[in-house]
Image (cartoon, grey):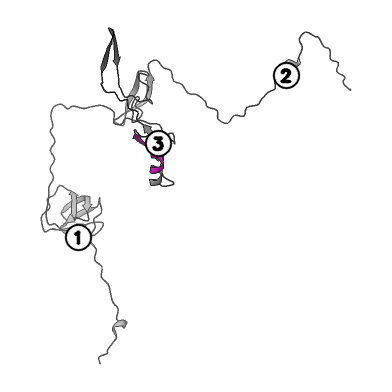
């Protein structure tokens, strides 16, 4: 006997399909014989980069050993590398980083004020009094700390050597312009580093100065200073005084 059931009493399933996703580092297999290692997977463009010594073929079914994802190979792009081997080689030794280099403008010591991650400086010919309000309105209340690097340019109609003739007198004006860093001291000292190899890596553990001697020091912060009254004016060195003291026994 047939029955009529309302639709609201029937279970309704919503099917959501998702694309396969391969895990970087897992092993992919084709027919249990061709294997490779996933080095990169672009899920948006569906590009899979595999490191393998075997030959992958089009229309082959590729399966991930960990993710269990499957995909058919539509196109194969092969990358070949070549290495030229000879009887000799050129090895360039040098510094991998410039940390701690002297006279380097890019090396700064963080002072939680000007040199910090939450500060910025505007380099302009306009003083900070004119642009401070405008920039402050654009910045968040808890934003960055701003500084001003004012550029002062000297203007002259004629550059170089200027001459003026007045009753046979000759005067020469030489205008020399240069840009220097006020935070950098030039020719402070000649230094060398004690370099050594640690785990086949060139490192250094000591900086040797040529003429300047640097040594450790102790800094005292928060010491209490006691004020001692000067009572030297209460003593008279020209008069001899005798004091008698009694003791009870």
Q: Is residue 111 left or right of residue 176?
A: right
Residue 93 sits above or below residue 23 on the image: above
- Please name the residue that numbered disc 1 is placed on: 70
Q: Residue furthest bottom?
A: 1
x, y (%) of residue 14? 27, 72
Quarter of the image that includes the C terminus: top right
Q: Is residue 183 left or right of residue 164?
A: right
Which one is in front in this view, the residue at disc 3 or the one at disc 1? Answer: 3
Q: Residue furthest left?
A: 58
x, y (%) of residue 13? 28, 74
Whole-number angstrom distance, CA of label 3 to CA of label 2: 54 Å
The quadrant holding residue 158 is top left
Indicate the secondary structure of the residue bearing disc 1. strand
Whether residue 127 appears in magenta in the rendering, the answer is: yes
Disc 3 + disc 1, Cβ < 8 Å: no
Quarter of the image that includes the N terminus: bottom left
Which mark, by number, is residue 231? Answer: 2
Q: Which residues are magenta?
A: 119-135
- Please name the residue that numbered disc 3 is placed on: 128
The quadrant holding residue 97 is top left
Disc 3 + disc 2, Cβ < 8 Å: no
x, y (%) of residue 99? 34, 30
Residue 105 sits above or below residue 189 on the image: below
């Amino acid at each position: 006997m047939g029955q009529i059931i309302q639709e609201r009493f029937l279970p309704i399933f919503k099917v959501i399909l998702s694309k396969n996703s391969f895990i970087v580092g897992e092993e992919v297999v084709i027919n249990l014989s061709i294997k490779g290692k996933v080095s990169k997977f672009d899920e948006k463009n569906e590009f899979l980069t595999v490191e393998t010594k075997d030959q992958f073929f089009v229309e082959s079914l590729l399966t991930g050993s960990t993710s269990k994802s499957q995909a058919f190979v539509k196109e194969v792009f092969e990358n070949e590398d070549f290495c030229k081997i000879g009887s000799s080689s050129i090895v360039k030794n040098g510094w991998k980083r410039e940390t701690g280099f002297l006279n380097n403008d890019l090396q700064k010591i963080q002072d939680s004020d000007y040199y910090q991650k939450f500060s910025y400086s505007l380099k302009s010919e306009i003083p900070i009094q004119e642009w401070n309000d405008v920039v402050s309105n654009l910045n968040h209340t808890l934003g960055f700390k701003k500084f001003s690097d004012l550029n002062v340019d000297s203007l002259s109609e004629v550059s170089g050597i200027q001459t003026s003739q007045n009753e046979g007198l000759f005067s020469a004006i030489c205008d020399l312009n240069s840009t220097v860093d006020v935070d950098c001291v030039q020719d402070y000292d000649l230094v060398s580093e004690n370099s050594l190899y640690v785990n086949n890596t060139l490192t250094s553990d000591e900086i040797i100065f040529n003429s300047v001697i640097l040594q450790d020091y102790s800094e005292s912060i928060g010491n209490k200073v006691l004020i001692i009254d000067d009572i030297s004016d209460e003593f008279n060195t020209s008069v001899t005084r005798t004091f008698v003291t009694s003791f009870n026994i």
